[in-house]
Amino acid sequence: MLRAGVLTLQGAAPEHALLLHAAMRERGQAGEVVAVRGPGDLAGLDCLVLPGGESTTIGKLLKRLDMVEPIREMAAAGTPMMGTCAGCILMAKEGDDEVRRTGIELLGLMDMKVSRNRFGRQRESFECQLEVEGLEEGFPAVFIRGPVIEERWGRCRPLAHFKGQAVMVSQNNLLALSFHPELSVDTRIHRMLLDMVPRT
Ligand code: GLN
């Protein structure tokens, strides 16, 4: 049975849990979704979602709860992970001045530099049809004060662009998105994450 974790410290965690359940159902796969609130909840997970919210708050809580190293170890061991919006920021190795000013420690999992709050304020949130590599039809992508991936190196590859800038990337077992796939009813991106889990 598949165990998918959703980091549940702050932000859009319940929506990810719903989409993961739906994605499992569509794949005909038995599984459960675990609300990850401390290091002990990471044990035995097949994949992990780092949701959107406030990267400053989530970053501070990860540190206070001693979850930074365990998550780094899981990522290095090959556990599939997906970071959305604030989660995308946390997965980056580098941040722009906006990120540096916050003083948070990034998880530093992916070969990329992110630039925070690059799509304006909350009221400038928008939805667009995004072409995503590996998906046949456009994905309804919701952007809410999301970051852009302004530099990539190493094995980090772009999977989607918006106005010429990378907004979805992958690197081995890791996926990061500037937008919120959990705020649509489209499960294709959550299925992509589940597809990365080796079948036993
Ligand atoms: N602007 C937020 C941050 O920098 C991210 C917004 C979101 O996750 N919707 O943490």
Image: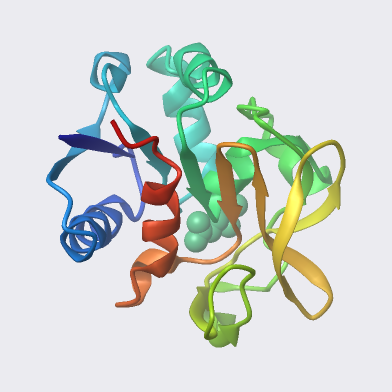
Q: What is the quadrant of residue 161 in the picture? A: bottom right
Number of numbered discs on residues: 0
Q: What is the quadrant of residue 125 in the picture? A: bottom right
Q: Residue at x 43, y 17 (%)?
A: 67
Ligand 1, by image quadrant, is bottom right
Q: What is the quadrant of residue 96 in the picture? A: top right
Q: Position of residue 103 (x, y in %)?
A: 69, 29
Quadrant assignment for the N terminus = top left
Quadrant assignment for the C terminus = top left
Q: Nearer the viewer, residue 159 or 18?
A: 159
Left or right, residue 171 beside residue 164 = left
Q: Does 122 sit above or below residue 37?
A: below
Q: Residue at x 78, y 42 (%)?
A: 112
Left or right, residue 79 beside residue 16 = right
Left or right, residue 159 beside residue 122 = right
Q: Position of residue 54 (x, y in %)?
A: 49, 48
Q: Residue at x 38, y 58 (%)?
A: 190
Residue 51 seen in the current view: no
Residue 181 seen in the current view: yes
Q: Does 69 sit above or below residue 84?
A: above
Q: Position of residue 182 (x, y in %)?
A: 36, 65
Q: Residue at x 52, y 12 (%)?
A: 69
Q: Position of residue 119 (x, y in %)?
A: 68, 72
Q: Does 108 sit above or below residue 132?
A: above
Residue positioned most to the front: 200
Q: How is the image coloured?
A: rainbow
Left or right, residue 169 beside residue 181 = right
Q: Nearer the viewer, residue 115 or 93?
A: 93
